[in-house]
Amino acid sequence: MTKLTPRQKNWLEGTGAHIGTASKNGNPTVIVVDKATVINESTVKFILSAKQVQLVEKNISENPRASLGPGGIGSIRAAYQFKGKASIVGNELFVEVNEIYSTKPGPEAGLRLDNLDYNDVLKFESSRWADDGPPR
Amino acid sequence: MKLNQAMKDALKIVGKGGVVVHLTTSSLDGNTNTVGERFITVFKDEFILIADMFAQKTRVNLNENQIGVITLAHPVNGRTWSFKGPATILQEGLPDDYEFEGLKAVEALKEWGNWAEKEPPSEVPPDIRPPVLVQRGVIALKVNEITDYSSEHAGNIINTEI
């Protein structure tokens, strides 16, 4: 089971994400939510507006997959992409993350992190970034 | 559709760390990919070009499903804009007369095929810039639809040609 690191959790919670969804035929729709809550080791919850629900509920009902790129300054400092299974309950969007990639530009762009040993991911992060989340 | 001046300015900041967008593409069966991109420019008013620095999953998606969404990620400052349209990767070696949605590949690559030479990323902090800017071509998106992504107005069409 995928386990988000403290750094990943802090960035997702602090800056939210650009959330990619698509129809079953691959027509993409993106919504942006500027905050999130990580509710267990791998699940991220976003509170959506009514208009955001309208935009993505059909996509998610026919194709429950989503990709997440951290928003705001997280798009620079938190070079990750998270992918997972999406579901909507009322105005809450849940994404159960099952793939995590580094998107840090350069030779490690696209490196998959979630299938590494968890302690190796922590070492990877601490050797490449000085922060553990957005500025507080 | 043509981007207005405010949009061109928002997508093009030289120095001060530049602009970051997220580019979302999808496989034909709906597996999306959302990745931050930093080397961006507006070309001929209605195309957005991004340096292709070996974006593997983006390439796989665009090879089978030529559509993309670009969302402004930083700095935003209220400019909650989403740009959607047909997208592809233009690369050296294409036929001389190759066009994508009216965009001549040779023109785009002549101007933006060597980003490091045209706009060296020296102002980008070393811990977030690539160690070497190795470019394979340009990702080109023709803007057919501009929408607002703010929570209150999500999905509202923005018309730049009134």
Image (spheres, rainbow, N blue to C red):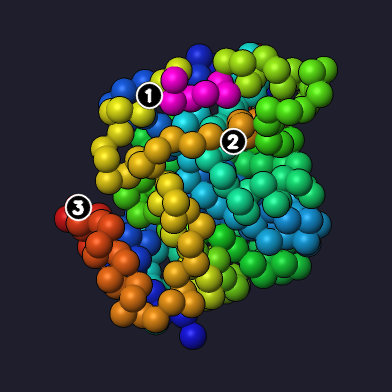
Q: Which residue is painted at 59% across and 28% down in the image?
A: B49
Q: Would residue B16 be visible to someone looking at this image?
A: yes
Find disc 3 in the rendering and name its residue. A135
Residue type pointed to by label 2? Arg
Q: Which mark is residue B136?
A: 2
For the residues labelled 1 and 2, the Cα–Cα distance comes to 16 Å
Tell me: residue B42, above or below residue A84: above
For the residues labelled 3 and 2, the Cα–Cα distance comes to 34 Å
Look at the numbered disc 2 and give the secondary structure of its residue. Answer: loop
Q: Quadrant of residue B143?
A: top right
Q: Quadrant of the C terminus of chain A?
A: bottom left
Q: Which residue is painted at 53% across and 71% down in the image?
A: A99
Question: Where residue A23 sits: x, y (%)?
Answer: 75, 58
Q: For the residue carrying disc 1, how many other residues have a C-alpha within 10 Å: few (<14), some (14-19), or many (20+)?
A: few
Q: Would residue A92 be visible to someone looking at this image?
A: no
Q: For the residue carrying disc 2, how many other residues have a C-alpha within 10 Å: few (<14), some (14-19), or many (20+)?
A: some
Q: For the residue carrying disc 3, how many other residues have a C-alpha within 10 Å: few (<14), some (14-19), or many (20+)?
A: few
Residue type pointed to by label 1? Pro
Question: Where residue B116 sits: x, y (%)?
Answer: 44, 26
Look at the numbered disc 1 and give the secondary structure of its residue. Answer: loop
Most foreground residue, A125 or A53: A125
Find disc 1 in the rendering and name its residue. B120
Q: Which residue is painted at 45% across and 69% down in the image?
A: A113
* Count of marks placed on residues: 3
- The segment highlighted magenta reads B112-117
Residue type pointed to by label 3? Pro
Q: Which numbered mark, 3 or 2, is in the foreground of this view?
A: 2
